[in-house]
């Protein structure tokens, strides 16, 4: 069982702030890392799938980086909006299955 | 495009009763997964399947059985429900590239065992 750790556990920011979260994982035998956005009462939605060391992905105001040698990934949100409020999940895995972290809960207020 | 559909959405069981949760996907995905989500624990993998007719154990398989007789369906069974199985269950699927592709999740089944 992989140990996937996310920090912080929760975060409260003001509208317009930029923020970032961390996902840490064992660096040996890396295969893929996923980021998901999970809104309350909905199901998780895939944001990024990253496979190569140094990968950088971007979708609108959200971006992610990957360092497989040291075992971490950062998720950045630029200019947070209230609609960004959600839990952000990181998952790391083998070819056939993923292990999820417990998530970072983001709340953005006006 | 329905994606991943889970039935039922809610269920209350008495201890010792049995039930089957159905997951259906219409995306022709090879891989399917069952996770459970508990407060403070994140999503934990129960069982998964890498193709029609195959199943494999995940992180927390005890007390559950699964079947994948058709590619589009993945069934999760509880033979004798226990209060420890009270949870929200999520089904997910991914394409033939497995973890190189983002998962598509169903909307979840909230199960309470009393």
Image (cartoon, coloured by chain):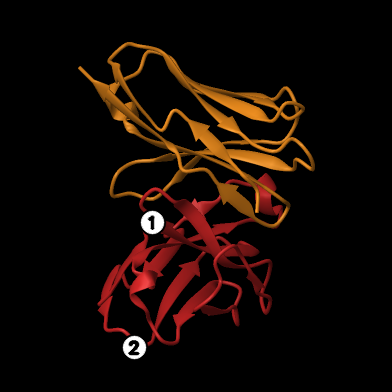
Q: Is residue B74 above or below residue A99?
A: below
Q: Is residue B105 above or below residue B73?
A: above
Q: Which residue bears the numbered disc 2? A: B17
- The chain in red: B
* Residue at the image point whose x is 39% and y is 67% from the top: B6
Q: Report the side of A108 relative to B40 (left or right).
A: left
Q: Position of residue A37 (x, y in %)?
A: 43, 38
Q: Residue furthest left?
A: A110
> Which secondary structure lies at badge 1?
strand
Is mark 1 in CB contact (under 8 Å) with mark 2?
A: no
Q: Position of residue A49 (x, y in %)?
A: 62, 38
Q: Is residue A28 above or below residue A95?
A: above
CA distance for labels 1 and 2: 21 Å
**Dot 1 alpha-carbon crowd within 10 angstroms: few under 14, some 14 to 19, many 20 or more:** some
Q: Colour of chain A?
A: orange
Q: Which residue bears the numbered disc 1? A: B38
Picture quadrant of residue B14: bottom left
> Which secondary structure lies at badge 2?
loop
């Amino acid at each position: 069982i992989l140990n996937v750790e996310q920090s912080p556990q929760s975060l409260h920011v003001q509208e317009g702030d930029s923020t970032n979260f961390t996902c840490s994982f064992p660096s040996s035998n890396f295969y893929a890392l996923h980021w998901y956005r999970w809104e309350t009462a909905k199901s998780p939605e895939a944001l990024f799938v990253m496979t190569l060391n140094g990968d950088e992905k971007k979708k609108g105001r959200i971006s992610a980086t990957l360092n497989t040698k040291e075992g971490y990934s950062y998720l950045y949100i630029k200019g947070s909006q209230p609609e960004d409020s959600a839990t952000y999940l990181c998952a790391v895995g083998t070819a056939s299955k993923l292990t999820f972290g417990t998530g970072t809960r983001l709340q953005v207020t006006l | 495009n329905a994606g991943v559909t889970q039935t039922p959405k809610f269920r209350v069981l008495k201890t010792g009763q049995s039930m089957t949760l159905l997951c259906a996907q219409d995306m022709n995905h090879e891989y399917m997964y069952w996770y459970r989500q508990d407060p403070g624990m994140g999503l934990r993998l129960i069982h998964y399947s890498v193709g029609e007719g195959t199943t494999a154990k995940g992180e927390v398989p005890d007390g559950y059985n699964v079947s994948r007789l058709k590619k589009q369906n993945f069934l999760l069974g509880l033979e004798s429900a226990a209060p420890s199985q009270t949870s929200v269950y999520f089904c997910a699927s991914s394409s033939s590239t497995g973890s190189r592709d983002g998962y598509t999740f169903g909307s979840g089944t909230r199960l309470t065992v009393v």
